[in-house]
Amino acid sequence: MKFRNPRQLIRPFRIVRSVNAISLEELRSEGIRGIVIDLDNTLIGWKLLEPAPDVADWVRDALDSGFAIAIVSNNVRAWVKSVATRLGIITFVHTALKPLPFGVISAVKQLRVRRKETVVIGDQLFADVLAAKLLGIRAILTEPIVTREHRAMWPIRALERYLLRETTKRTP
Ligand SMILES: [Mg+2]
């Protein structure tokens, strides 16, 4: 994949309000079979302990309808494992160090899907989207579940907004 403009490297395939706004039928029609998904602020709000019910329903629907799903998170094993278990997701990668692509590579291998049949879903341009695009995998950016975040994220979010300023938002 060639990137003539550096902004292409972090341009998501699609932007949605939340995970449950993603149409599984649309993903299927786009040839997607594998879903690699971020945990914090994508499946669970920052500092919250339970997955959002709508998101949990979406995950169940996806699993029931035959999608292979893996969580790839930069968070620690105990947390990632407990959320994965609650959501019925068997495959997970913890301490993934996104935007390094190794966690996504490992997840795709474990799911036994091809990269072109995979989508990465997450709330951070510089972690989730970048890791996916370094591998030529499509990425869907979600808005963070909880907009109040650790202040270390503020400058990163400001830069995301700047880089996405010309990207049309698709409203679900
Ligand atoms: Mg996240």
Image (tube, grey):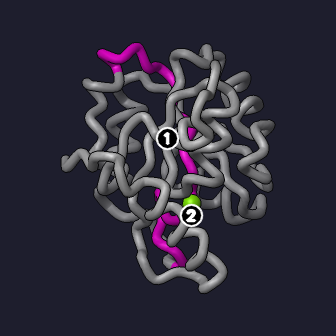
Determine whether, in the image, residue 128 is placed left or right of residue 58: right
Query: Is 42 one of the magenta-colored residues?
Result: yes
Q: Which mark is residue 40?
A: 2
Which residue occupies the extreme front position in the image? 4
Residue 134 in the image, given as x and y percentages of width and height: 69, 33
Residue range in magenta is 28-47
Secondary structure under tag 2 reads: loop
Q: Which mark is residue 11?
A: 1
Determine whether, in the image, residue 76 is placed left or right of residue 44: right
Binning the other alpha carbons within 10 Å of mark 2 as few (below 14), some (14 to 19) or many (20 upward) gives: many
Question: Which badge, 2 or 1, comes first in the chain's sequence?
Answer: 1
Tell me if residue 2 comes above or below residue 89 in the rendering: above
Q: Is mark 2 within 8 Å of ligand 1?
A: yes
- Which residue lies at the image location 49% right of the left edge and 77% below the top edge? 48
Q: Are marks 2 and 1 in contact (CB under 8 Å)?
A: no
Disc 1 residue type (three-letter): Arg
